[in-house]
């Protein structure tokens, strides 16, 4: 495998993780907006599951892990 391929793959991997985390966080906020209007327990459960997913996607030592924890709290 060429060295440039390994470097390119390594550099794009964090970006993909960040993009996935951003999309998952946005989904959680959308579900929160739905909960605010419906006050349905199932929507609240969806929010918790979504923000837990974001936290699970955080790599160890990731700078935005505190924000993910805050969203879950």
Image (cartoon, rainbow, N blue to C red):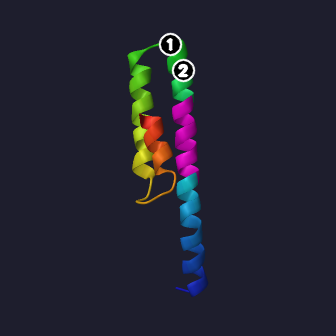
The question of residue 21 being in magenta is answered with yes
Name the residue rendered at 54%, 72% in the picture.
10
Asked if 63 appears above or below 38 in the picture, the reply is: below
Tell me, yes or no, whether the two marked residues, 2 and 1, touch with CB atoms within 8 Å. yes
Dividing the picture into quarters, in which one does residue 45 lie?
top left
User: Looking at the magenta stretch, what is its main secondary structure?
Assistant: helix
Which quarter of the image is occupied by the C terminus?
A: top left
The Cα atoms of the two marked residues, 2 and 1, are separated by: 6 Å
Q: Is label 2 in a helix, a strand or a loop?
A: helix
Marking on residue 54: none
- Residue 38: numbered disc: 1
Give the numbered dot on residue 34: 2
Disc 1 is placed on an element classified as helix
**Start-end of magenta stretch:** 19-29
Name the residue: 52% across, 42% down: 24
Q: Is residue 58 left or right of residue 18?
A: left
Q: Position of residue 6 (x, y in %)?
A: 54, 79
Above or below — where is 43 with respect to 69? Answer: above
């Amino acid at each position: 495998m060429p060295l440039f391929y390994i470097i390119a793959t390594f550099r794009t991997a964090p970006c993909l993780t960040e993009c996935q985390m951003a999309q998952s966080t946005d989904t959680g906020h959308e579900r929160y907006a739905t909960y605010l209007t419906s006050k349905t327990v199932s929507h609240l459960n969806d929010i918790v599951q979504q923000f837990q997913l974001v936290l699970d996607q955080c790599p160890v030592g990731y700078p935005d892990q505190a924000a993910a924890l805050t969203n879950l709290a």
